[in-house]
């Protein structure tokens, strides 16, 4: 990607696109799922796919010991670790049902444990869970096995156990290193603690480490966040995910504990973003897209250069586009031309599995238009380019005619330098990568027909 000059990332352009919009880990987005799509439809989709092609598997562990006030994840706050046992039992039943539906050991090229805090589970429970997964799925040689780690819940011994279980990628939830900010969001974890864990992870041979950051938290300033960025650069993680905080207390109860008056103003958030981008590029990181960065030799950066990026519910990935099976409360599956989401409450999830029924509560069967638009949006999000001829051959449409209104709207983004409209293609510019969600949402039929975007985070 060509360098981005200071002029192109000016405040006016950042402010102009400081609007809400989807992250496009799927299209249509999850808010479009319907309750008419439940377990029977998901079961049929699983049976139709079989075991011929590799799967991606996501397992949601909802438990956390402490509440982080900014969190918008589906989680259960408890210090009672015995609550994990019945949940793991329910997961076992769900795995059985999925394995039965696909007809055997489906090959898996990617496994991710998220939450909540997967490291809420004990070493013995993590061992039991991985054994259960290996009995129902065939983890392929070289498969990407990743887990989200709360630095407050692990030490060298725990990291060594994760490595023994086969995990080769770790994602550390950091958010910010400033002590006052950490206290304001109820997540205190000193820099030295994270630094020691990062060093241990390298010594244990983990292939990749990721650090999650959030900008726009209470008491953050451009200066304080710049210090955090400098500390993260010192740790040299292979990947960095830097998310904008979306303050939606009406939707997420924990956020009601955040004092709104302590949140940084919009101008400061933009300064944090532009400052962090400049600093990370200066430290040699490659900008992957949206809010992701990687070292130049990381597989994600290599995939970006080669035009081989993919995108799913876990964000950008090097894995080829494949079906995803989501296990656990609130998890989302993508199988063929369908999406299916499990029940969002623990009681509903476990009740369904006690009856040996898939716990799907809502989902969607994609229409031809959905599939077409998904192809365009994912091409923009991953390759930064849409070739009309390729889309026309796959979906038998005349692209300029089918997307005439969208192409007209793109002329405004072209004037801003975000895209180039070629005779047979749409090309996202180096500058446009920073605003790729704004480019993608032009093709979102549902969002264009719905003026309300309050349920989404800001694009910038």
Image: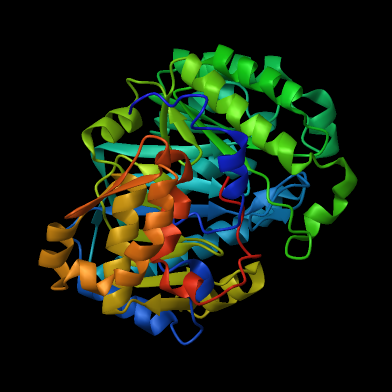
Point 41% across, 48% down: residue: 415
Say above or below: 324 vs 180: below
Left-right relation of 402 to 360: left
On screen, residue 338 above or below 269: below
Residue at x 35% of width, y 25% of height: 298
Whole-percent x and y of residue 452? 62, 71
**Toward which corner of the image does residue 441 lie, by quadrant?**
bottom left
Q: Is residue 437 left or right of residue 19?
A: left
Q: Which percent across, then down, holds residue 58?
A: 43, 53
Q: Is residue 156 left or right of residue 49?
A: right
Residue 421, placed above or below residue 353: above
Q: What x and y, as percent, mark residue 268? A: 73, 34
State the residue at coordinates (52%, 61%). Answer: 328
The residue nearer to you, when weighing 152 against 99, is 152
Taking the view exactly as shown, the residue that stands out farthest to the bottom is 36
Residue 242 in view of the camera: yes
Please state which of residues 67 and 237 is positioned toward the viewer in this rendering: 237
Q: Residue 40: name its quadrant.
A: bottom left
User: Image point 59% across, 26% down: which residue?
Assistant: 276
Picture colour scheme: rainbow
Q: 368 or 192: nearer the eye?
A: 368
Is residue 101 among the parts visible in the rendering? no
Instruction: Give residue 265's position: percent from left, percent from top.
Output: 78, 41
């Amino acid at each position: 990607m060509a360098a981005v000059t200071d002029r192109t990332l000016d405040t006016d352009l950042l402010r102009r696109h400081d609007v809400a919009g989807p992250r496009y880990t799927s299209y249509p987005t999850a808010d479009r799922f319907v309750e008419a799509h439940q377990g029977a439809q998901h079961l049929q989709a699983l049976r139709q796919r079989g075991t011929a092609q590799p799967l991606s598997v996501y397992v949601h562990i909802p438990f956390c010991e402490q509440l982080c006030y900014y969190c918008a994840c589906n989680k259960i706050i408890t210090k009672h670790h015995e609550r994990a046992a019945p949940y793991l039992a329910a997961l076992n039943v769900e795995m059985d049902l999925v394995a039965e539906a696909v007809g055997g050991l489906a090959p898996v090229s990617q496994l991710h444990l998220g939450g909540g805090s997967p490291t809420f589970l004990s070493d013995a429970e993590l061992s039991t869970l991985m054994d259960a997964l290996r009995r129902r799925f065939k983890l392929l040689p070289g498969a990407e096995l990743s887990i989200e780690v709360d630095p407050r819940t692990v030490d060298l011994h725990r990291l060594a156990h994760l490595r023994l279980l086969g995990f080769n990628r770790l994602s550390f939830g950091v958010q910010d290193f400033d002590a006052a900010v950490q206290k304001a969001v109820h997540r205190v974890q000193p820099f030295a603690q994270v630094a020691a864990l990062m060093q241990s992870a390298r010594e244990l041979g983990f292939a990749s480490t990721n650090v999650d950051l959030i900008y726009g938290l209470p008491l953050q300033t451009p200066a304080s966040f710049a210090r955090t960025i400098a500390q993260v650069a010192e740790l040299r993680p292979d990947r960095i995910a830097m998310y904008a905080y979306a303050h939606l207390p009406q939707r997420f109860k924990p956020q009601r504990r955040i004092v709104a008056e302590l949140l940084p103003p919009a101008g400061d958030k933009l300064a944090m973003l532009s400052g962090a981008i400049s600093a990370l590029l200066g430290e040699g990181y490659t900008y992957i897209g949206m809010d992701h960065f990687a070292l130049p030799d990381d597989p994600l950066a290599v995939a970006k250069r080669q035009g081989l990026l993919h995108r799913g519910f876990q964000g950008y990935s090097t894995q080829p586009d494949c079906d995803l099976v989501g296990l656990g409360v609130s998890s989302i599956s993508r199988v063929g031309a369908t999406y299916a989401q499990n029940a969002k409450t623990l009681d509903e999830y476990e009740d369904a599995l006690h009856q040996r029924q898939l716990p799907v509560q809502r989902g969607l069967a994609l229409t031809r238009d959905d599939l077409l638009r998904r192809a365009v949006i994912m091409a923009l999000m991953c390759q930064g380019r849409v070739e009309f001829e390729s889309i026309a051959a796959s979906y038998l449409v005349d692209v300029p005619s089918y997307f005439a209104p969208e192409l007209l709207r793109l002329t405004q983004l072209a004037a801003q330098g975000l895209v180039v409209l070629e005779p047979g293609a749409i090309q996202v510019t180096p500058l446009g990568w920073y605003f790729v969600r704004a480019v993608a949402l032009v093709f979102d039929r549902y969002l264009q027909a719905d003026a309300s975007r309050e349920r989404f985070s800001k694009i910038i």
